[in-house]
Image: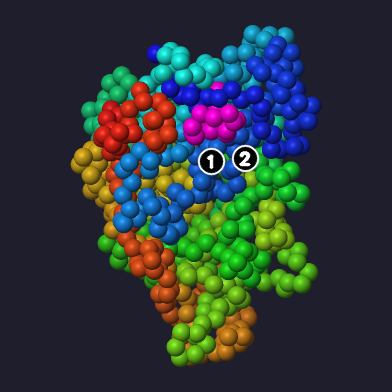
Amino acid sequence: MKTKINKYIVLSLLVVLGVVSSCSDDFLEDKKQYKYFDEEFYQNEDRVTQYVNNLYFDFFDAYKSPTAIRVGSYTTTETSYTEEIGGISNLINPNVSLVNAQDGSGYYGPALRDAFDNVPYNRIRDCNAMLENIDVLGANLPQLFRDRIKGQMYYLRALQYYDLMRTFGGVPIVTTVQIATNTDESIKLPRATVTQVVNQIVADLDQAATLLPPNWDNANYGRFTKGAALAQKSRVLLTYASPLFNKNWDDSSIANGYKGDKNRWQDALDAGLAAETQLTADGYGLYGTNAKQWAEMFYINNNAFNKEAITIKLLSDGNTGSLYSNNSWERTIRLASQGGQGSGGVDVPKRMIDLFPMKDGTRPMDINGTAINTYNPFLFFKDRDPRFYRTFGFSGCFWPYNNTITTSTTQPTVWAYRWSTNATTGVAYSMGNDVSSPAFVRKMSSPTVSNASNFQFSGTDIMEYRYAELLLNIAECYAAKGDISNTITYLGKIRNRVGIPAANNYGIGTLATKYAALEACLYERSVELAYEGKRFYDIQRWMLYSDDATINDNTNSKLGIPVINGTQRIGNYLHYKLGTSAANTDPLATARASISVDPDAANFATQITALATFYTTNFELRSPPTPMDQVGNVATNIDWKSHYYIMGLNLTVLSQNPWLTQTKGWNDASGNTGTFNYQE
């Protein structure tokens, strides 16, 4: 039996070239001539390299925001399913229930057609074609060159199957070039089990690790390395060990005593430690030794080696349109007064503001949402984790930028409050910044990026996989095995780097059980990796929206983590409370002129104290007229259905490939209940 997938593996006779500077017109014309890429094509190093470059483009060109996920498509919607950003969409809308095949995910690919779509199985096919031919038709090329080409193909293929697995669970596995046809029964492969998909991914990454170099030269920086392949294996096996795919995740006999391939946590730990050893030897590690350098690592080594970056998307500050790929994050987060789009800014929900630790590493809120450890939710900026001030901005903070607009006044200290212009509903906004939260996202911004065209031409690179994440992967594996000492050691490395004192286990305290240790790991990930596109997958693999016995889900109660379902992301305006003022007359313009809070300043603590006094004297919090989470302007609670964790195949896929089974919880093309079980 072969696979149905070949209905979607249309021959890629042309490679869509989006980065003009890396691919020549001659190359494109040559590819038009080669229906199956003849021997001459594979005998030319330049053309083979361009083929590989184009695959990087197909996989990653859409990756222009750190919150985006899923290779090829890179959508940011999933961030709004988490605590990080508000807004109700279908998958968390209590008024919508998606269960039919027509509601299934479109990520798998479109209907068979005469087009060269950049979709998962076309990308897999392009990897397979190079792997099949480079050693045969390209045997004249140097062995080292061919090995590095194959290493990149194995990595890319593994990466694509990993995102298919995280979306659909088991999918058909295709590792050879097949011709799409309606008559060849041999290509009608069924959905593989999740275990089979994971085994294929791991085999590809193991191969990649044997073929890729520890580092590339400067001209090839950004390509995958040996250490990256090992780190990606760690990430895959961590996902496989997690409750979503592992109904035995909490079996202590399996976690602590090796039982063949069932000891998933041990396998994930071994992979993480191997990656750590390799990457350390190759010059990788945590960037910097303080919070200032933690913030700088996101932009300071632009397009050059960064020891924190295991994998990285290199971007350009070029301003000639389609010839360059720019970072879209800067223009998303910058405020209007700085040159951002519209009113500018990304409003931070209250729960996210309250999430980050205090400066000694202790929690600001208990499990019931009550402030503890001297935390004051109104004066939320006092005595917080050093990462807080580099992740969020707030009224009175110093947030520099490169003002290249000659008609605009540079205003590095930002203010985003409002005041009443009359006794009823009229309001105006300081510096034109309409932000319905007292905090806004500033993480991964660069002070050197020009604000021309609303920061459109940012070239800040995006670190897709940081060394910190690898350490957090290792910590989580230790926690799942009940090794609390090593869990704290690895969490301590993350906190020590940003200057949190070592006392009381860096503020983590005593972790009495493995469940407390696992919760501590997930908490640290939500802080360290905030707004980096990781939180949704953490929620997904631990099934944290609610507990549901029908899918073996009791993780919230086990770990002591409040469910997300039934909650809202809350926004509040910082509002001037001492009367009214005309729309064009800021009542605090003079009083605030001397206030600016810079976390890198020597007198930062004094600045914070002055700002706290200013807030207490002048402001209060008021609910916005439109709730952050709303449907039809009515405040709405999050409601994620359990069968959404693994999406159903859509109607197009099932109709054209009737031998494929639908995922449990979803209806198939005939309306029958799906039977494919992603938990083993």
Q: Which residue is mark 2?
A: 61
Secondary element at tag 2: loop
The answer to whether residue 35 of the structure is visible from this angle is yes
Q: Residues within 10 Å of mark 1 (few under 14, many from 20)?
A: some
- Identity of the residue drawn at 28% across and 36% down: 671
Rendered image quadrant of residue 187: top left
Q: Secondary structure at mark 1?
A: loop
Q: Position of residue 158 (x, y in %)?
A: 50, 26
Q: Amino acid at mark 1?
A: Ser
Above-or-below relation of 389 to 658: below
- Main secondary structure of the magenta stretch: loop
Q: Position of residue 42 (x, y in %)?
A: 70, 15
Magenta residues span 109-125
Q: Amino acid at mark 2?
A: Asp
Q: Quadrant of residue 540?
A: top left
Residue 73 marker: 1
Residue 120 inside the magenta-drawn segment: yes
Visible residue check, residue 158: no
